[in-house]
Structure formats: C-alpha cells, structure tokens
Image (cartoon, helix red, strand yellow):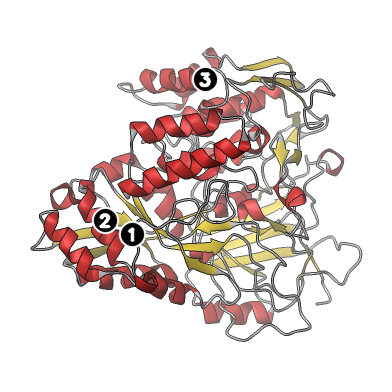
Amino acid sequence: MNGTTTAAAIETADVSGSVSRIEKPHYGGILRFRGPGGPDHLDTSSAYYATSGQILRALTRQLFAYPASHDLSDPFECFTPAPDVAKEVPTVGNGGLSADGLIYTIRLRDDVYWDTVPPREVTAADFARGLKRLANPVCGAGARHYYTSTILGMDAYCEAYEAEFEAKDISAAALAEFQNSRSIAGIETPDDKTLIIRLKQPANDFLNILAMGFASAVPQEYDAYLPDSPEMRANFISNGPYRFAAPPDIRSELVLERNPAWRQESDPIRHQYLDGIEITVAREAPESLRSKIDAGDVDLAWSFTVVSWAKPEPSREQFPRSYPGFTLNPYLVFNLQSPNAGGAMQNLKVRQAIAYAVDKTEISKILSIMQGVPNRPLHSAIPPGSTGHREFNLYPTQGDRGDRAKARDLLVEAGFGDGLELIAAVREARLHLDVMESVAANLAEIGITLKFETFSQADYYGSVLSDPNNARAGGWDIAEPGWTPDWFGNNGRSILQPLFQTNFKPGTTNYGGYSNPEVDRRINEALEELDPDRAEKLWHEVDVMVMQDVPIVPLLAFAAMTSRYHSKRVKNAIHVPQIEFFDITNLWLDPSA
C-alpha cells in the first residue's frame, strides 16, 4: 500500500519512548494529528497512498490483514497476513485451498457489521463488490494488475468494463448496473459467509494481494455514488472500530469517533482504545510542530517530517532493531506521454542525460537530516530487501555525484543542444522542494530548465500523477514520487508490476505511461514461475530491462520503517510496515503523561 509513500512521510526516532509503561491499556481520549499531508482517496477502490492506508486501517476491514508488530526483526510476524474477516487462513488441510492451489474457499466470521441503521452483517457479496469496483473508469485501482494477473476472468471483466464506458456518459447508476449485472468467472458467493476465488495459476503471494486495501469489503449503499466522490465520502460507511463523526474533507479536517457497530470479539487485528481521532490538515514548520508535540498540544505529525536535531537519549527507545527492507524513495519518473518540448521525454538520450546528470549523493545528504534513517544511492528499480534486487549500475558516475559533461554530450546527441524547458511536478513540502531544487541545479548545468508546479501531498498522487489525461496534456514532465513495496518477504510482483507493466488507466501508478511489450511478457513469465530461485532471476532481468529504457531514475534506497516522534501520552506505538506507520487502532493514551 501502501503502496505509494514519500520521503517526507518518514520521520525521526521517537525520543519520548514508544513502549508503554502501563501494563493495561487505557480507554478514552482523543488522538490529535496535525500536518500538511492527507490521503489521496478514501474509497478503497482507488486509495493507494501510505497516508490513506493509515486512516483506512481504522475504518475498513479486509479478508486478511497484517498485525501490528513490536518487533520488526521477526519477518514471519511482520510480513505474514493473518485472518481478519476471514475465519482462518485457507489450507489444503482445512479445505480452504484446493490441492492444485487454484481454488480458495474463504469462510467469513460472524458479527462483523456495517455502521448502518440497523447494523447489517458484512457478507461475501460485499467483498465481491469491492473487487468488481477496481475496474471503475472514474478512479480505478493503481495495482489492478495484481488481480487481473491472478483471478480467473478478472482481466476479461475489466476489459468489458472499459469498453462499456469508453464512449458513454458515466453515472453512478450506470456503473452499478454494469457491476451488478456482470460476474467475474473466478469469484463466487454461494452464501453470505462463503467467498470462493479461482486463480489462473497458483500464486503463493495471493494472501498478500487479498490483504491490500483494494480487497476491502464495500457496502451496497456505495452503488448510489460515483467512486470517491464528495457524496460517497459524505456517506462513508465503516465496518472498522472507528467511523467519521462528520463528512471528511481530506484537505482540511478528518474527525473519527468510535463505531458502535464494531465488535472486538470479531476483530483480531484492531482495537478501540480511543474515544476519537482528530486530524487537522495544515501547513506547519517542522520546528513549530515539534514544539506542539513536546507541549502536548499535538500527538503525532500527519504525513510530515518532524526533524529531531538532538540525539535520542540513551535511556529512551531509539530505532527498530532491524528494517524490513528498503523503499524506492525518492525516484524521478518521466512523463513519456508529454507533448512538451517536442516530446523530449520520449527521447531515450534525454532520459539518459538526466540519469547521468543527477547528484544522488547530494540528495542523500538533504534527506539525511532525518537522523538514524538509513538511505543510500540506488541504481535499480528494485531496492534492497525485495525479491530480485541485485547490485548493478547502468549509469555509473564517480561517487554518485553525477557526470554533467557526459550528460551534456547525450543531450546534444538527442538534438537539444540549445537546451529545453520541462515542467517539474513537486510537492510543496520543504524536503521535496529541496530535492527537486538540487535536481534542477544539476540539469541547469547541462541546459535543461525546470519550471516548478507545486501541489499538496494529497493532490500530488490523487489527481496529478495518477491521472493519464493530465499526463497526455503535458501537465508535467518530471516528478519525484516514492514507492514502498506493497508487502515485504515474498514480494517479487510488488514493485515492477504496478510501476512498469502497461497500465495507463485512471488511478495508475505507472505514472509516466511506460509500456514495453517485452517487459510485460517477462513480468508475466516471472509471475507464472513456481521455482523461487528462477523467479528471483527473472525479476532481476526485468529490472535490468526497465533501467535500459530509463522510465525512471532511482535516487535513494530508504529504510521502509522508522519510529515516529510523538507526544509522551501516546502508548503502545507499534508498527505496520506495509503502511509505514504506527497502527492507530492499537494506540492508547496515558492521561497522566
């Protein structure tokens, strides 16, 4: 999920101590967030930003989910999905998995309710509805490939959905009619408590796919609204421990309260310790926000970097003992669909020139202000700690400082000896501006001028990069996003498939519209390979092919999880690496702190 994230979403170590001194949790209190970030979407069919996953953790339920972990050094505990609404993990022994690995029979828990009047039980049809909505043409799923490449008939259903609305007015009623009148060959709901899913071929990471927010249950009431529309958000229905206390505004305020329909006995993953959660979206200097946290006026920064210039006290908890892999964060992505500057971004030599020009070591220094957060220059799309990562560098420069002379020669060879101007899409947070200003200074030396267009955190992913129409119109040429693998451990598909397999539909995470039929074919080959060693080799080979095309320039490999600075009253601050944050449904507040 959590897919997309940002360097600014990674914060410094907790110097106030995150291990609770209270043996039993305290119930009550309002958890207060403040910062300039926000979710990209609140609809699970399209929400893919790490901040979205952090808030939806409290509002939605999946078949399987990742438990929060005190110990990030235990891969099995951190990386293995556990039953959420599902009663148990399907196995051959319990009859939930066929001997050939193609049929999953998932039985649901009782007493999981929607916050409706009266409360209504979550059913298998609600999960089927959630999967069907991933193909919607309004704001579809950024990682739809995970489902079309595994579930039987999912690709045909998505193609039919797209064809149906290619030249047709889109309305909520029309979308609902299509979804309710069409079935997916590999999905059956024989009764309210049983979901059967048939796969194209065995996939030993299928539970990871079902643990993503995209596979959430969706209530039937959403048929009345366009996906992620203001009307849908205003009528959000929760089945998690919290619900919205008022219509949410992702650009200003989100207020959560306890969901009275939620039952602790039917949720093994989450808790309801807090009375509520208040999130204020506001621009705030790091020093000011840190002062407010120290004073107890704010509990946690919201999608924001709070820099601790002082070393953590030796007696206090510092950083996790180990890191569950690294992220591709940040990286430069090129809009290969842009008509700007005579279609310069489509020219391989222009992209190679930029790859040679950038000083990655300087960017590493910029982001090293987040003390204790390991980062290092990266040369591949797959970062360390993920399946398929091997060290290689197709564009080497001394000390990763860049080679502007070589870059200038490539730009001349590309036919742009007189220089060119490109549009850089940049988040308005200071660290991201600093990174892009460093890139701009490097590119100015070779004759490329960057014109900055700035956006909020939420708009950056939610409406700028993930909108193919904006890319085709030349709304940007170069951007600086980040990517966290959607899961760790057995995660071969969680980087190359969403970022580079052909997918230029609304909600895409292949932001620049990169498409190489041979890369697509090799990704599919890796997905179908059952031998882990052979699959690892194939993922590496795809990585090399991608880097030869230069649709992106990897900048840094960043630690996927660090502790966050928080107020003294925040206790039981335990991590969920997949959303790069504490699990807010496991936090409680010490009123005496």
Q: Identify residue for label 3.
A: 179
Mark found first going from the N terminus, 3 or 2: 3
Label 2 element class: helix
From the viewer's perspective, is 566 left or right of 373?
A: right
Residue in view at x 60 percent, y 82 percent:
291
Q: Choose top left, top right, bottom left or bottom right for residue 419.
A: bottom left
Of 71 and 1, nearer the camera is 71
Does the rendering let one see residue 137? no
Marks 1 and 2: in contact by CB < 8 Å?
Answer: yes
Of 337 and 239, nearer the camera is 337
Q: Identify residue for label 2.
A: 352
Mark pair 3, 2: CA separation: 44 Å
Question: Could you tell me residue 360's position as x and y percent?
Answer: 39, 69
Residue in view at x 77 percent, y 50 percent:
77
Mark pair 2, 1: CA separation: 8 Å
- For label 3, the crowd category at 10 Å Cα-Cα, with few meaning under 14, some 14 to 19 and many 20 or more, is many
Residue in view at x 35 percent, y 62 percent:
426
Question: Could you tell me residue 338's position as x and y percent?
Answer: 23, 46
User: Please, is residue 317 above or below residue 514 in the view?
Assistant: below
Q: Choose top left, top right, bottom left or bottom right for residue 319.
A: bottom right
Residue in view at x 52 percent, y 52 percent:
39
Label 3 element class: helix
Q: Identify residue for label 1.
A: 395
Give amino acid for label 2. Answer: Gln
Give amino acid for label 1. Answer: Tyr
User: Which image quarter is the C terminus in?
Assistant: bottom right
